[in-house]
């Protein structure tokens, strides 16, 4: 059977790295007296996936999780519950604003917030139990408690039951994720001033919501409450929302959010907070300095980013180094400066994304088992789950320009897509960047309903080094939203048909 180009590259990488590394398996398993082959600290997307993969590779594995519920921030108070509320609030918003245009009318419509929250909680609890089931299926030992290093191969665990136990392992993986980044002078009480965790559990719909930070999380949570009736104002220190996003797409995205009545105060910083009254009073001033103003809100969401969670792990005691941002530097096999101690996910440099942490976890234990792990950080997709969604992979146009690469751009609007027009949901576009000389795809950016699903055609194409013509000459079913990707590819290397 012919070997694919990607398989050849990985096989070559395995051969070359094995020469450079010698035997990773024998190095990692130098100590033969320890109880576990792998101990994972943290049961989030990176940690639980690493634990399951390690067990599947035949390694005796223990996973330690302080929360008492697997899935980490993502499943318990992040990705999953936020997407549940995004979907529920979108259904309500559609019922109010879109259903009449489709001939569906109601005499009365209201939000049952407790029922909405219950649906979210049901999704979370079901998925958490599912991971525990996977642990049992794959024979992963699960310890509920807070673990910290007693030695490079020993973890002391304060169990949730109140006792203490020591877990030994030949290889320890730190997968403790990240926590909310605080702001000076802003105290999060999860009532009036909330993190994303508190924003997922509000007992009533705030009349006025101020979001500090115009990144992925802030815009998503602002969308949830804005759809349900809150007046949402986003305060952002930078000059743009989602600064990592392609500039052209970002401008269209912001206009779309403004059409949904979300307000933006860019190049603005919070310099004071007063919670003494019934409302929260924020004191604001221009980022560059200047006259101060005040802004009132019922609830303030602090969404200024996340920071690696390594507190209380005892890293200093065993000599694990961290950088000035609190991240743990690792080599290409995810090993820290201490032999046998590894780190993955949000605690190491790179995007703080659940799917990136999962890839880290698989690759890390593959290295531990003497195999060749693989993560292409240039091809980690990012998605903002608003409506429309915005998804991207690869380079932005600004990055391509800065690199001095000659390139072509192809764009196709969903206003010209038959499926989007048929369902009356045609805001957005597909934008493809390709190298001018070779037509190799450099980046793809999509703003559309379900952009987070559409982007993976581009991820796979770029993983195999495809050209825009390769996508353009691939048959796409009609009528589908994905035809816009094909048309944008046609516009990149030649001309589109339907525009």
Image: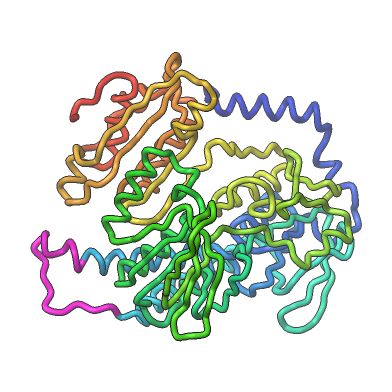
- What residue sits 45% from the left and 70% below the top? 294
- Specify whether 117 is left or right of 166: left
- Specify whether 110 is left or right of 115: left
Based on the picture, tell me whether residue 102 belongs to the magenta stretch.
Answer: yes
- What residue sits 38% from the left and 22% below the top? 408
- Give the vertical position of 297 relative to 362 (above or below): below
Foreground: 271 or 127? 271
Identity of the residue furthest to the top in this view: 437
- Give the vertical position of 211 relative to 25 (above or below): below
Q: Quadrant of the C terminus?
A: top left
- What residue sits 49% from the left and 27% below the top? 400
Which portion, as a residue range, is magenta?
95-111
Identity of the residue furthest to the front in this view: 291
Residue 453, given in percent of the width and then of the height, sits at 38, 47
- What residue sits 33% from the left and 20% below the top? 493
Foreground: 190 or 26? 190
Residue 488, given in percent of the width and then of the height, sits at 30, 30
**Residue 91 position by quadrant:** bottom left
Residue 99, given in percent of the width and then of the height, sits at 15, 64
Asked if one can make out residue 2 in the rendered structure from this viewpoint, the answer is yes
- Give the vertical position of 241 relative to 163 (above or below): above
Q: How is the image coloured?
A: rainbow
Asked if one can make out residue 126 in the rendered structure from this viewpoint, the answer is no
């Amino acid at each position: 059977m012919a070997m694919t180009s990607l398989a050849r590259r990985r096989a070559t990488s395995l051969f070359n790295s094995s020469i450079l590394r010698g035997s990773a398996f024998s190095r990692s398993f130098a100590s033969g007296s320890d109880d576990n082959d792998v101990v994972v600290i943290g049961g989030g997307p990176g940690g639980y996936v690493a634990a399951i993969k390690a067990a599947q590779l035949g390694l005796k594995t223990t996973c330690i999780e302080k929360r008492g519920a697997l899935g980490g921030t993502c499943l318990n108070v992040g990705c999953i519950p936020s997407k549940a509320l995004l979907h529920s609030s979108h259904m309500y918003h559609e019922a109010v604003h879109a259903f009449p245009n489709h001939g569906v009318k109601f005499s009365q419509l209201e939000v049952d917030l407790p029922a909405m929250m219950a649906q979210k909680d049901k999704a979370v609890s079901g998925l958490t139990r599912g991971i525990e089931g996977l642990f049992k299926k794959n024979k992963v030992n699960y310890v509920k408690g807070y673990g910290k290093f007693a030695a490079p191969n020993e973890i002391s665990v304060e169990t949730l039951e109140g006792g203490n136990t020591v877990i030994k392992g030949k290889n320890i993986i730190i997968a403790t994720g990240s926590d909310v980044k605080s702001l000076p002078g802003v105290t999060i009480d999860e009532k009036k001033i909330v993190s994303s965790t508190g924003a997922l559990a509000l007992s009533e719909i705030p009349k006025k919501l101020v979001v500090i930070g115009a990144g992925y999380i802030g815009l998503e949570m602002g969308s949830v409450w804005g759809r349900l009736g809150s007046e949402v104002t986003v305060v952002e220190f930078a000059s743009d929302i989602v600064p990592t996003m392609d500039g052209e797409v970002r401008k269209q995205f912001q206009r779309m959010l403004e059409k949904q009545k979300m307000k933006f105060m860019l190049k603005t910083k919070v310099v004071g907070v007063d919670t003494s009254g019934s409302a929260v009073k924020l004191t604001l001033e221009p980022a560059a300095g200047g006259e101060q103003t005040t802004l009132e809100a019922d609830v303030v969401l602090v969404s200024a980013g996340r920071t690696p969670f390594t507190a209380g792990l005892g890293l200093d005691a065993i000599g694990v180094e961290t950088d000035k941002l609190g991240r743990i530097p690792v080599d290409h096999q995810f090993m820290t400066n201490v032999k046998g101690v590894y780190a993955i996910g949000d605690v190491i440099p790179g995007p703080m994304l659940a799917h990136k942490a999962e890839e880290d976890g698989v690759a890390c234990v593959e290295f531990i088992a003497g195999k060749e792990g693989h993560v292409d950080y240039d091809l980690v997709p990012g998605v903002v789950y608003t409506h429309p969604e915005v998804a991207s992979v690869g380079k932005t146009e600004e990055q391509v320009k800065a690199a001095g690469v000659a390139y072509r751009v192809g764009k196709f609007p969903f206003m010209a897509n038959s499926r989007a027009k048929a369902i009356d949901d045609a805001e957005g576009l597909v934008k493809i960047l390709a190298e001018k000389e070779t037509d190799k795809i450099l980046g793809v950016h999509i703003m559309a309903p379900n952009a987070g699903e559409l982007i993976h055609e581009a991820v796979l194409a770029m993983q195999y080094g495809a050209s825009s013509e390769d996508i353009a000459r691939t048959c796409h079913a009609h009528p589908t939203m994905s035809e816009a990707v094909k048309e944008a590819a046609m516009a990149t290397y030649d001309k589109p048909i339907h525009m």
